[in-house]
Amino acid sequence: MWSKSGVSETVRKMGNAMRSILAFIPSERCQRFLVGDLKEMPLDRTLDLSSRQLRKLPVAACVFNELVKLYLSDNNLSSLPAEVQSLRNLQLLALDFNCFEELPLAICRLPQLSILYLGNNRLYHLPIELRELRELSTLWLETNCFTIFPKVVCELSNLKTLHLGYNQIRSLPKEFGQLQELRSIWLAGNQLSEFPPVLLEMHSLAVIDVDRNRIRYFPSLSHMQGLKLVIYDHNPCVNAPAVAEGVKRVGRWADSSDDEQEDVSSKAASETTAEVVEIHPEEQHNIQG
């Protein structure tokens, strides 16, 4: 019987072999092999081209101007054709698990875009043009290369959910307080040395996640009446944040046991996020697992 590591190695070799074969297929034929012929508008106005080893998005996909959802997750994309901006009705765009170092400007010209997944790329800044996405309510930027908070995000007035975990962020700017519609902020796995002061004035926040940072002291959060969940585990803190009655805490000195805390974190995070955002299947797995 094969071991798990043996199976993984076999799968890896098969993937490398497939890439080698595709390298010898002429470009046009290669695209057809990977995605098929894109001739008709999908009935549900959703196009899923995830996990196709794509290095370029077929321009043929951009002719479906009634498209509402476009999934391009888990490919090898580092750019998008300018024709993407013709997708004027697009509401959801998933570009997570790709190779983007810069955000394609064509994305910033999608007037109906409300959900944008950019996690697990190589982004370290965002263009000022991002502020043109007036309908954007959910933005995923986790596991990128940000060392400074991208201030243009503060101009997304309709933003309700922001995932910026697992970068190298050290602080939030005071302009962050402009996001009056924000309901959940996810900052786990960054380099915060103090609880961001600007969050103390954002009374509409329901979820604050600062797990796995460097925070040594937590101010009281008891005045934040909209708060439902605060995750502060894995910080070198000397106290737990004080919260109002009914607010769930996950971290050292919280009221529940470690096992209960894990259950509370998963359940509350899923429930609260579901209130304000359409969950991307891959990211829902990450939250619950």
Image (cartoon, rainbow, N blue to C red):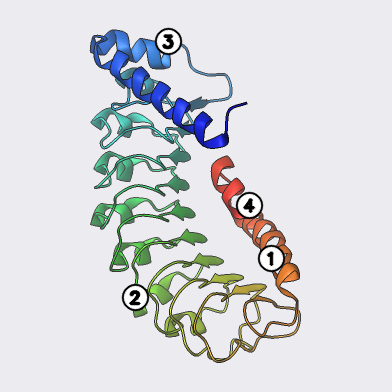
Callout 2 touching callout 3 (CB < 8 Å): no
Look at the numbered disc 2 and give the secondary structure of its residue: loop
- In primary-sequence order, the first of circles 2 and 3 is 3
Q: CA distance from mark 2 to mark 3?
A: 47 Å
Q: CA distance from mark 1 to mark 2?
A: 26 Å
- In primary-sequence order, the first of circles 3 and 1 is 3
The kind of residue on which mark 3 rests is Lys
- In primary-sequence order, the first of circles 1 and 4 is 1
Identity of the residue drawn at 44% across and 66% down: 189
The kind of residue on which mark 1 rests is Glu
> Mark 2 = which residue?
170
Q: CA distance from mark 4 to mark 2?
A: 26 Å
The kind of residue on which mark 4 rests is Gly
Identity of the residue drawn at 39% across and 60% down: 156
Residue 221: name its quadrant.
Answer: bottom right
The kind of residue on which mark 2 rests is Arg
> Mark 3 = which residue?
39
Identity of the residue drawn at 50% across and 84% down: 200
> Mark 4 = which residue?
289
Q: Residue 9's mark?
A: none
Q: Is residue 131 or residue 30 the one in the foreground?
A: 30
Q: CA distance from mark 1 to mark 4?
A: 10 Å
Q: Is residue 49 visible?
A: no
Callout 3 touching callout 1 (CB < 8 Å): no
> Mark 1 = which residue?
262
What percent of the width, then of the height, locates residue 114?
Answer: 47, 47
